[in-house]
Amino acid sequence: MLNLFNLSLKISGYPIEKAKQQLSEILAVPDNDYSLFIENKKREIVDFHIENNPFYKNFIGESKVTKWENIPTMKKIDFQIPLKERLSKGFSKRNVYINSTSGSSGDPMVFAKDKLGHALIWANIMRRFGWYNIDFNRSYQARFYGMPLDFIANRVLRLKDYLSNRYRFNIFDLSYPGIEKIIGEFKNRKFDYINGYTSSIVLVAKYLKKRKLVLKKICPSLKACIVTSEMLFEEDKILLSERLGVPIINEYGASELDIIAFENPNGDWQVNAETLFVEILDENNQPLPYGKEGRIVVTSLYNKAHPFIRYEVGDFGILDEKSTPKKPILKKLIGRTNDVAVLPSGKTSPGMTFYSITKKLFDDSGNVKEFIIIQTKLDTFEIQYASDMPLKKAEIKTIESVFSDFLEPNLKYIFTRKEILKRSETGKLKQFVSLINNQI
């Protein structure tokens, strides 16, 4: 079989063989020397951008950087200027990889990566998927991501999928008939693994449970499922494992950076210390020790086209106490920093915690397939849900009572049943949304 994936990278100008060699050299650095190796890479990328990127030099200011901890952090909002004004000398839109973030965190952004840096990212992704005997050139992927509705853009993406040995499902139709069509494809195609948005794959698993089916029995070639882009709750991981019949692998990443953490075969969420430097910072932008919760801040060590240095991805997390410089472990990923419910009393509640409480209540009956929570006013929350049957008055009363205990009394709740919940243009389901503008 032709190595179509490697070939497609080469045709696009990404030097994958050179990148694989560079990755081998990074991996060969001894554990005892890795801390110094990373320190040198951090200094190299900062010095490069100060010298070659006017945007970053202006961002840093005139004062000489002497300590890493004093380098200011970057946020998406800092990049809200035209891309050409953010590129380093020697780079233009013609010789870089360009893409954009989904905007799910409120600040969509166009970004760039230099071609060797982008190839290095792919080399490392291929290595990590290889932990589960997944070969990008040979393994057939069932892909649960969004797709453009424009005819030409859709055809281009389909061709790209073909060259990448993957089949893309329409996740905008996850009705029962839509899921039946998906299952039909698993009967007819020899998929090796599933990769895509957590919420979409969970919906398929819930339907399989309803039908008392296991996907591995329908598609015996299936070996693994990698979920990404949305939170994976433990109860959903159990459901996926039972109904898909294969290992469930949790991936955490950011399109503008790389995979940030990827679950290894031992069940640890292994942080990418090959192409990134990941920190957990306190409110004063100072690094926290392992085991302490703070903001996740990431530096892209090899992207020379565009600076991502001490870049805030918008999440809270904890690095495990057993972490080492060469093998950091993400102990816990906590909700996004901007997904916070603000209450009339001034109390705040992380949106994902609020969501997880609701999820446990809904999962008791199995009636509600999925839902989102929208804070429309300081004292009002709308809960949009898709279900087989409308919620009963007694169920709504129980939910309101739990919310009253968990949040505070005298809040208003609007329950809205829908056939299908609206997803973003990329196909993601944003599970908690605040429409109020309070500053925390």
Image: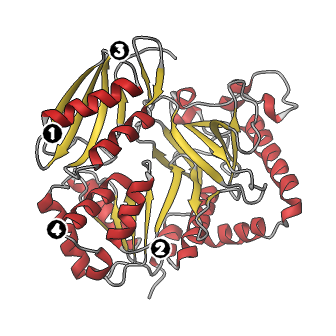
Query: Looking at the image, is mark 2 or mark 1 earlier in the sequence?
Result: 2
Crowding near pointer 4: few (<14 within 10 Å), some, many (20+)?
A: some
- Residue at horizontal 33 percent and vertical 31 percent from the top: 402
- Residue at horizontal 88 percent and vertical 31 percent from the top: 66
Q: Quadrant of residue 142?
A: bottom left
- Residue at horizontal 53 percent and vertical 27 percent from the top: 77
Q: Nearer the viewer, residue 433 or 381?
A: 381
Query: Residue 5, labelled with which disc?
Result: 2
Callout 2 secondary element: helix
Q: CA distance from mark 2 to mark 1?
A: 47 Å
Query: Looking at the image, is mark 1 or mark 4 earlier in the sequence?
Result: 4
From the top left corner, tell me how far across and down residue 395 is, in percent: 20, 37
Q: Is residue 73 left or right of residue 407?
A: right
Mark 1 = which residue? 391
Is residue 429 visible in the rendered image? The answer is: no
Q: Are marks 1 and 4 in contact (CB under 8 Å)?
A: no
Query: Looking at the image, is mark 1 or mark 3 earlier in the sequence?
Result: 3
Query: Looking at the image, is mark 3 or mark 2 earlier in the sequence?
Result: 2
Mark 4 = which residue? 181
Amino acid on which the number 2 mark rests in the picture? Phe
State whether residue 325 is above or below residue 372.
below
Query: Which of labels 2 and 1 is toward the front?
Result: 1
Residue most toward the bottom?
Answer: 1
Quadrant of the frame with the N terminus: bottom left
Mark 3 = which residue? 378
Crowding near pointer 1: few (<14 within 10 Å), some, many (20+)?
A: some
Callout 4 secondary element: helix
